[in-house]
């Protein structure tokens, strides 16, 4: 565990970057530091590996004051990932990843073998190993940065806005990759971001910092969204925090309908049996969604795809959240979300009304659970 005890960082000109910060960062979890510019996120991260020394207070790693360790030994025991990866431009990808193992005295062959193993783990093709950083895309470079940080198998990984310089699609892929790797390795990760969506998605625990480096709230993402500590936290979370909170409500219990789903080669009898439905979801021969059509405009055995309405973004029941299902229904001009399996084949459709009922039921269960916990606490007293 990393324990930050009443840490302050004050610069010679009187600027206070971090002010009396205390945090207990749990082992094997992702702790996210989030907040506006100037709130001391990066300064706090850099104090953990002594790139910045605190003015007051102390930081403990597994109960030991980090100032008792030689600084180079401390830093080599922690992976460090920064924005734009910070790769050595004159070294190949394999040699970039092998940097810390080589500094620790590993032989070249062993270090490169470890680098090749990690390239596969972070989703990089082995053929990229002999290339140089400038020959890779931004997303690929960030993957190299993560692999390099993991090369010596450190128990702690520090990540300073590592995905902020890439486009949203690549960023989502990198976030998913980090969660997958963390699932496998269980590192203690301290992650800095200014993006509350990224914090909510990645964090096991989220620390919201105020300008001036003071802690506003430290809580799991679901608690943060449901019960902001004060007006500052509520404002920072944004007006759509209720939508974000739906990320923690599963979609597994949604009642799906299969009646409005028809294949592209449906005959007249099947199309005619849906006269009362305003729209039908047309699928291809493999069951994958193509779009929505009005029953009266669909021609038996020869649906014209250009006349179909878009079906929005599908969701996978059980894997995706109610937020994803709701998003799919909002994106669809019909107001219905399309549910698919892991292979993208249609398993049913669901209306906004049914999703709304599921949201209300989820809120009711949470309220009942909170009331039960309060009653148990009262009985214990």
Image (spheres, rainbow, N blue to C red):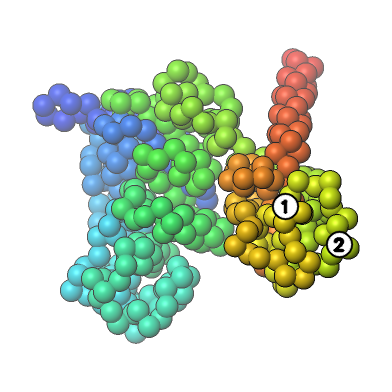
**Number of numbered discs visible in the structure rendering:** 2
| Relative image position of residue 127 (x, y in whole percent) | 38, 83
Give the vertical position of 290 relative to 160 (above or below): below
**Identity of the residue drawn at 70% across and 55% down:** 293
Residue 173 position (above or below residue 111): above
Q: Is residue 299 visible?
A: yes
Q: Nearer the viewer, residue 2 or 166?
A: 166
Judging from the image, what secondary structure is the residue with disc 1 in?
loop
Picture quadrant of residue 333: top right
Q: Residue at x 15, y 24 (%)?
A: 14
Which quadrant holds the C terminus?
top right
Are there few (<14), some (14-19), or many (20+) residues within 10 Å of tag 2?
Answer: few
Q: Secondary structure at mark 2?
A: helix
- In the figure, is residue 244 to the left or right of 85? right
Q: Nearer the viewer, residue 310 or 110?
A: 310
Task: Tell me how far mark 2 sits from mark 1, CA to CA.
Answer: 13 Å
Contact (CB < 8 A) between labels 2 and 1?
Answer: no
Residue under circle 1?
294
Q: Nearer the viewer, residue 279 or 63?
A: 279
**Left or right for 308, reference 106:** right
Q: Quadrant of residue 111?
A: bottom left
* Disc 1 crowd, CA 10 A, few/some/many (<14, 14-19, 20+): some
Q: In the image, is 103 to the left or to the right of 297?
A: left
Image spot of residue 95 (x, y percent): 28, 76
The location of residue 304, given as percent across then percent down, is 66, 65
Where residue 214 appears, as percent x and y from the top left, is 35, 25
Residue occupying the point 23% across, 71% down: 134
Which circle's residue, 2 or 1, is located before the other in the chain?
2
Residue 77 in view, yes or no: no
Residue named by callout 2: 270
């Amino acid at each position: 565990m990393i324990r930050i005890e009443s840490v302050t960082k004050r610069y010679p000109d009187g600027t206070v970057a971090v002010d009396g910060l205390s945090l207990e960062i749990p082992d094997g979890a992702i702790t996210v530091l989030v907040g506006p510019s100037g709130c001391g996120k990066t300064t706090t991260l850099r104090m953990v590996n002594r790139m910045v020394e605190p003015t007051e207070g102390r930081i403990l790693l597994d109960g030991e004051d980090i100032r008792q360790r030689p600084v180079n030994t401390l830093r080599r025991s922690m992976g460090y990932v920064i924005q734009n990866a910070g790769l050595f431009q004159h070294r190949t990808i394999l040699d970039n990843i092998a940097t810390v193992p080589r500094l620790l005295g590993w032989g070249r062959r062993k270090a490169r073998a470890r680098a090749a193993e990690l390239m596969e783990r972070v989703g990089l093709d082995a053929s990229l190993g002999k290339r140089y950083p400038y020959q890779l895309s931004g997303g690929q470079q960030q993957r190299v940065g993560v692999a390099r940080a993991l090369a010596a198998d450190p128990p702690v990984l520090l990540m300073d806005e590592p995905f902020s310089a890439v486009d949203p699609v690549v960023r989502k892929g990198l976030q998913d990759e980090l969660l997958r790797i963390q699932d496998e390795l269980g590192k203690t990760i301290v992650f800095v971001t200014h993006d509350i969506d990224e914090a909510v998605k990645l964090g096991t625990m989220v620390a919201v910092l105020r300008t001036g480096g003071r802690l506003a709230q430290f809580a799991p993402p679901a608690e943060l969204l449901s019960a902001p500590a004060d007006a500052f936290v509520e404002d920072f979370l944004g007006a759509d925090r209720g939508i974000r909170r739906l990320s923690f409500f599963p979609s597994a219990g949604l009642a799906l309908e299969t009646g409005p789903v028809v294949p592209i080669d449906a005959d007249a009898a099947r199309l005619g049996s849906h006269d009362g439905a305003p729209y039908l979801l047309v699928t291809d021969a493999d069951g994958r969604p193509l779009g929505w059509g009005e029953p009266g405009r669909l021609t038996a055995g020869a649906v014209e795809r250009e006349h179909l309405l878009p079906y929005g973004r599908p969701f996978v029941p059980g894997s995706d959240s109610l937020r994803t299902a709701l998003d799919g229904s909002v994106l669809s001009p019909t107001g219905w979300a399309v549910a698919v399996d892991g292979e993208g084949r249609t398993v049913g459709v669901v209306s906004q009304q049914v999703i709304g009922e599921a949201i209300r039921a989820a809120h009711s269960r949470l309220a009942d659970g909170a009331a039960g916990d309060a009653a148990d606490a009262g009985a214990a007293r």
